[in-house]
Structures are given as C-alpha cells and as structure tokens.
Image (cartoon, rainbow, N blue to C red):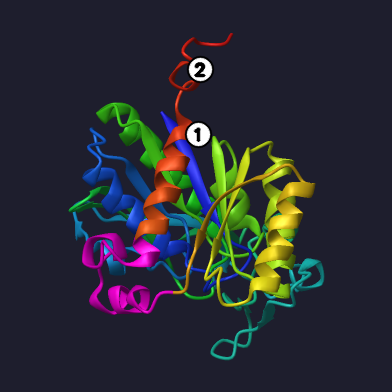
Amino acid sequence: MKQIVILSGKGGTGKTSITAAFAHLGTTYGIFPPAVFVDADVDAANLSLVLQPGILDPKEFWGGSLAVINPDQCVNCGACSPVCRYDAIFPDPQKAQVQWIDPIACDGCAACVYACPEGAISMVPQQEGNWFQSNTSFGSLFHAELFPGKENSGKLVTLIKQQARLFAEDTQSQYVVIDGPPGIGCPVISACAGTDLGLIVTEPSLAGLHDLKRVLETLRHFRVPVVICINKADIYPEGTRAIREFAISESIDLIGEIPYDENLPRAMIEGKPITLLFPDSPAARAVRDVWQKTIQLLQPQEDHYGSSSS
C-alpha cells in the first residue's frame, strides 16, 4: 500500500481539484479495490464538496484539555494566577471569593493544576471537532472538521490518516491519496510524514515558486520523494519557465503542465471532477496524464525494469 500526499504552499493552486480528478480516474482505470482518499485540510475541508460523500460513521474528536476550577473547593488563595503564562485566570465575576479560568485564553498547560494547594483545579478533555468515514462514488473518503478556534489540527490530521491507512490495509487497497492542507505548518507536517510520494501543485508566479520551495524543504526534511505539477501553466510563460529551470536544478521530475481551462471552475460549480464532467477538455487530458505518471512512479521496480531490485 502506497501513500501519496498532494501539497501546495498556499490555497487556490488547484490541489483539491486535481485530487478529485484522481478519485474519478482511479475508478475509470480500474484500480480495485478503490484508492482511499483523505482530506487533510481539517480547518477548511472542501474535497467532500466535489466527491459528494454519504457519511457512514461520524465520530467525535477529543483533543486537548482545559483547566477548570471547582468553585466549591477554591479558597481564593491566588496561587494559580502567577503561574499562568497566558493570563487566563481572573476573579470570578459571579463569585468574587473564587477564581475563574477563561477557556479561550487557557492553553491547557496544567501549570495551575500543580500550583493549586487545594486540588481545586482539574484538566477537562474538550471535544475539538468531528471526523468522518464516508462513501463516495469513487471509494472511501476520510475527512474531518476542526471546531473554530481549536489548535489541534495536526493531531486530527494524524488521526484520519491513521484511520485511512488501517482501512486501506483491511480492504487491501493499493493507494491512499491525501489532499494536504496549504502552507508548511503542523497540519502539513502531519499530512506528509510517512508518505511514499509528494506531488507539489504550483502555479507560474513569483509567489508560486516561493511557496514551492518552502513545501519542497518540508518534504525533503521527511525524506519524501517529490514531483511537481504546474497548474495554469500557460497564463505566465516566464513563470512556468522559471519553475522548469528550478526543477532541473534540483533534479525534480516535472510530471505535468495543466493549461488554464474555464471548464475547471465550471466543474467545481457543478461539484464534480473535471475528468468526469468535461473529459475531453485540455485540463482534463493534462490531469489524466499526471495521474498515469503518478501511478507509474508508485509501482514496484519490476513494473518499470522487468525485475525487482533489492
């Protein structure tokens, strides 16, 4: 079983559109059992808008814990307030004789728990989101929603990746395809760790090249092999040329250049992969080529050279 993560340095490069097309192409080209898909952008999940899943098994995600004061035990000694680095402890406006912890300001460090001589403070687990295993027309999708203001997105990404991998092993699926979050923060690190191939989707601009370099450093840190795909490659030839030259200088395979195609936003509006709705469009043909090259890269060595290397 192979895991591929699709990343970009920022949002809006077409990463999710390509992932959705991969889901359709996997069934079209007879991959069975179907590939398992993961939407690792738990802060703003949108792959489900295109794959239109029916949710099978929603589950709660319990992340960190917050400190809570038991007013019946608090003697208002004030020992907790000086150790709070986040200034989250105040006199309770309802009960002036006890302290109160602001749940928004609290970071869950538990320093106040150890400082309280009365044992009046405890750490209470918090539900920070939900995660889902869903059925789609193209196979199973694992996705999640982190509640607003919560900070355990990396942990939630790790959870749904693990669940997807276990499901793939149980169903003997050959591939897990991860639609990664934008940027290079904790969710991206969780999404790319342990994967077999990273596909970076970039666009021909100075910002696109800059973000490409940042994501490349992240993937290389985790020793993940990397390939590049340029989306909207024809809108700025000079920018595309700069990315080609960078790929050559870094010995990275450029496996596709997808042209700007008005059919792509039309497909997104319809909530369907472009390869399904407009299969003969220029972008669909280019994405199909990227998919085929990606699968070839994930095949065992004997598929390429006729014998297995040890």
Q: Residue at x 62, y 88 (%)?
A: 96
Residue range corresponding to the magenta coloring: 261-284
Q: Which residue is identified by label 1? A: 297
Residue 280, image x, y percentages: 27, 63
Give the SS element for disc 2. helix
Q: Residue at x 64, y 72 (%)?
A: 237
Give the SS element for disc 1. helix
Q: Residue at x 67, y 59 (%)?
A: 184
Residue 168, image x, y percentages: 33, 33
Label 2 crowd bin: few (<14), some (14–19), many (20+), radius 10 Å: few
Q: Which residue is identified by label 2? A: 305
> What is the quadrant of the N terminus in the image?
top left
Between 72 and 259, the residue placed more toward the observer is 259
Between 262 and 32, the residue placed more toward the observer is 262
- Which secondary structure type mostly characterizes the magenta part of the structure? helix
Query: How many labels were placed on the picture?
Result: 2
Label 1 crowd bin: few (<14), some (14–19), many (20+), radius 10 Å: some
